[in-house]
Amino acid sequence: MNKEFLKKIFFQSLTGFLSLALAILLYFCIKQMNQLQSTFRWVMNILAPFIYGGTMAYLLKTPCKFLEKKIGAVLPEKHKSKANMLAVLAVLMISVFVIYLLLSMIIPEIGRSIMTLAVVVPPKIDEFIQWVLRHLEGNEVLQNYVMNAFTSIENWLMNWAKTDLLPTAQGMMGGVVTTVGSVFTVVKDIVLGIIICIYLLAGRTKFAKHGKALVYAVFKPEQAEALLKECSFIDSTFVGFFGGKILDSAIVGLICYVFCMVMTFVTDFQNAVLISVIIGVTNVIPYFGPFIGAVPTALLILMSSPRNCLIFLIFIVILQQFDGNILGPKLLAGSVGLTGFWVLFAITLFQGMFGFVGILVGVPVFAVIYDLARRWIVIGLKKHGKLEVLSGGGDSDPDPGPGPT
């Protein structure tokens, strides 16, 4: 009895000590948040090549695995060991070609669009002002308000150019050395990242074996199995989401390009390639992507033809309805499993925490967290004999195991 009492006192004291230690640690982290953030950024800058390389390798591992199987099937038996390296070289060459193809289509279109806007915008503004004044003839009060508004906007633009734009440009010219140094650093990190990507893709099987051996060495067999199964589920969630989203965006961009080409033959529609690429690329961003892509492209079309802009906006609404209700669910079925509310919540939360990167990875990360929470709740309900709360009183038994692997 005395031993049990001492044991109870010991665990209570240990719990109190750990709680106090965690509270002190949390206070220290909050107090030194700026220092921790700067330290984190410093570490991230050092590890930037490995982050770039790991990201590229993860995105390319699925097509690399596919190409390795295809290449290995046609190689003689004595050369099958070379299939992996040939697949790595092939997927890198394809990636470089796709990036070059996109840039070769986008850059000339951007230059042409800028030149067109520089020529078209000033006359369009004058036409708009004259149109407004014609419709306000006989109402001198409103005409004065409109002219004062246009004058105020013009003065604001002039002041902005003098007080903000010119000093910023001078600062940029003065910091050319710093800018060149930053660009050089980014280019260096990307080049090192490509080299690291090649190493990771070529040795991905070996790295996987080493990671699996480490897990079994640290954890008990049943814990190791559960951890590896969870890692497999996380990987399938991310691969399914990004693979499906990229394919979905490519199809959306292609449909938009076909529509733009038809409009080009029928009307004086311009910038078909640039508009289609913008719509396709921004569609990768969940939920907000269609709106982000539609606004600049609609403004670009509006400068040349308001009628075409209206037709294009109607088409975008129809296209996004098709993508959101038919195409997207078909391609992403089973990869995320979140309702629209949780998708919006995940994007809002992770965008606030990690910025643009959070927008891209927030949905699959939250899908994994959501699945873990769901299975934890199911296990808890089973333990307390209250599973009918989740199943609505029926006899169904929700599966607490991880999603598709």
Image (spheres, rainbow, N blue to C red):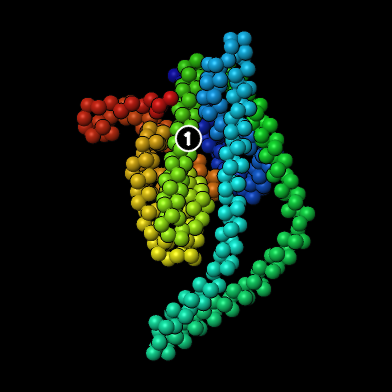
Residue lying farthest to the front in this orientation: 265
Looking at the rendered structure, the kind of residue marked 1 is Gly
Q: 163 above or below 139?
A: above
Q: Position of residue 172 (x, y in %)?
A: 72, 60
**Quadrant in the picture for residue 267:** bottom left
Taking the image as shown, residue 21 lies to the left or right of residue 38, namely left
Residue 131, image x, y percentages: 44, 79
Pick the residue in front: 296 or 207: 296
Report the residue marked by disc 1. 243
Say left or right for 322 vs 195.
left
Q: Nearer the viewer, residue 117 or 332?
A: 117
Residue 246 relative to residue 88: left or right: left
Residue 54 shows in this picture:
no
Task: Name above or below for residue 44 compared with residue 205.
Answer: below
Residue situated furthest top in the rendering:
78
Judging depth in this view, the residue of 38 and 152 nearest the camera is: 152
Residue at x 48%, y 39% (from the top left corner): 246
Instruction: Determine if residue 193 is in view.
Output: yes
Vertical arrangement, residue 302 with respect to residue 315, above or below: below
User: Which secondary structure lies at badge 1?
Assistant: helix
| 237, 6: nearer the viewer | 237
- Quarter of the C terminus within the rendering: top left
Residue 199 percent across, percent down from the top left: 66, 26
Residue 130, horizontal then vertical, whole percent = 47, 80
